[in-house]
Amino acid sequence: MPQLHIVQGGIKNGDKAWLQKAARDKLSSPSWVAPKSAMIGDEVVIFVPDFGFFATGQLKSLPKPRVDWPNRYGSGLTSITLIEPPISLATIRRHIPRLTWANYPRSITTPSPEIAEEIRKLVRNRQKTGIPDLDDDALAEASLGELRTAALMKARRFAPIGSCATNASFGPFCASKFICADHLEQRQSWSDGGVAGLSFFNKANDLWT
């Protein structure tokens, strides 16, 4: 069975934007930083800071020294697929507590086969369903991408597009007192009323204001 490696992607260096384009246009990278021991056909999960597990891919060439980066090796990367929404670091730590890399996720690593299978399961589930953890504890630590997905799910569940009954007395808020699909670009209201719901609303509201 191919090994699984966790590799890094940046934001300011253009990695994140390139991964999004590569997934859309089926592009390959001639050299992505990977472990020296990696083999052709190995799987990679790409971690982007502030986002989490962002994409998956497959190595298509043996590692070679990077001319632009001393003591680093690069392998060709192909079959890039986004993880939407990305799996936040908090979610990784909660689901895979034995993955000690997550305590300081600044390097590349090759987890043990047992932990690698846990990572595959977590990634497969997110890529298949697109649904983040929705319990209060999870939402309190969720990334903006996960919060936005959760908010959109609530909008679709309670207010299908076109069904809003806006009341002017509520000002920018929807009369139905929940996140309305017609008004995602405006300030949102949240039906829970509790501390967790308010916290969720405050975080989700930042996405559109």
Image: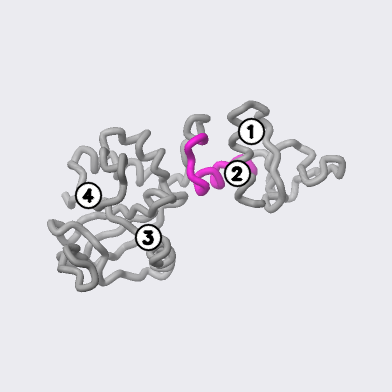
Residue that label 1 marks: 198
Residue drawn where x is 55% and y is 42% of the image:
150
- Crowding at dot 4, Cα within 10 Å, few <14 / some 14-19 / many 20+, comes out as some
Asked which secondary structure carries label 4, the reply is loop
The answer to which of marks 3 and 1 sits earlier in the sequence is 3
Residue drawn where x is 31% and y is 39% of the image:
103
Seen in the picture, residue 3 relative to 60 is either above or below; the reply is above
Quadrant assignment, res 197: top right
The type of residue carrying mark 4 is Thr
Residue that label 3 marks: 10
The answer to which of marks 2 and 1 sits earlier in the sequence is 1
Asked which secondary structure carries label 3, the reply is loop
> Magenta stretch containing residue 148, yes or no?
yes
Residue drawn where x is 37% and y is 55% of the image:
55
Q: What is the distance, in whole Å, between disc 2 and disc 1 at their CAs?
A: 10 Å
The type of residue carrying mark 2 is Ala
Asked which secondary structure carries label 2, the reply is helix
Q: Are marks 2 and 1 in contact (CB under 8 Å)?
A: no
Residue that label 2 marks: 204
The answer to which of marks 3 and 2 sits earlier in the sequence is 3
Measured as percent of width and height from the top left, residue 19 is found at 39, 64
Q: What is the distance, in whole Å, between disc 3 and disc 2 at their CAs?
A: 24 Å
Residue that label 4 marks: 109
Quadrant assignment, res 166: top right
Q: Are marks 4 and 2 in contact (CB under 8 Å)?
A: no
Measured as percent of width and height from the top left, residue 82 is found at 40, 56
